[in-house]
Image: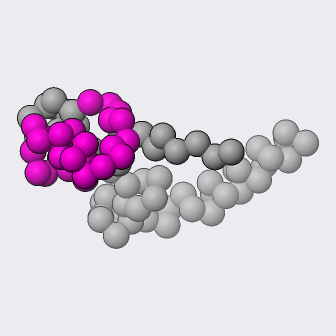
Amino acid sequence: MQKEEEDGEDDENDFVKDLLTEEESMRPEFLTGANAPLPEVVLPEKNGVTGNLAYTYECPQTSEEFLSITKEIDILDLPTVRSRLNNNLRFS
């Protein structure tokens, strides 16, 4: 069975071998999917704008508790803090 698979791969390689020249194969419209270059990823150097975000936060029960949690947090980091709030609700 492996011989059949190898024969099938050889047939496919023969079929696509000379469809594009080397120059054509480097054109952007052909560099897609597995052939596409990997985009550069910029990793954050710190955690949040000021670098002081906790991984999790206790879920506030009142607006005063929420304000006390977020008083030292930069406004740009508020969506991140909101997503890191622990949901302390228990279902019975």
Work out which residue is located at the far bottom of the displayed protein and give it.
29
Q: State whether residue 53 is above or below residue 87.
A: above
Indicate the colouring scheme.
one colour
Give the image location of residue 12, x and y in percent.
Answer: 67, 58
Residue 68 x %, y %:
18, 40
What is the magenta range? 54-79
Residue 36 occupies quadrant: bottom left
Q: Is residue 74 left or right of residue 28?
A: left
Q: Residue at x 29, y 65 (%)?
A: 28
Residue 74 drawn in magenta = yes
Image coordinates of residue 40 in percent, x first then y, are 24, 45
Left or right of 10? Residue 5 is right
Vertical side of 59 occupied by 22: above or below: below
Whether residue 44 is visible here, answered yes or no, is no
Quarter occupied by the C terminus: top right
Residue at the spot x=25%, y=52% of the render?
63
59, 61: nearer the viewer: 61
As drawn, is 2 to the left or to the right of 28? right
Q: Is residue 19 above or below residue 10?
A: below
Please, which residue is most extreme toward the right here?
1
Report which quarter residue 32 is drawn in.
Answer: bottom left
Query: Is 33 on the left or on the right of 65, as rendered?
Result: right
- Indicate whether residue 43 is drawn in magenta: no
Q: Residue at x 45, y 58 (%)?
A: 33
State which quarter of the image contains the N terminus: top right
Foreground residue, 49 or 64? 64
Q: Nearer the viewer, residue 88 or 24?
A: 88
Question: Residue visible at 62% across and 54% down?
Answer: 13
Total numbered labels = 0
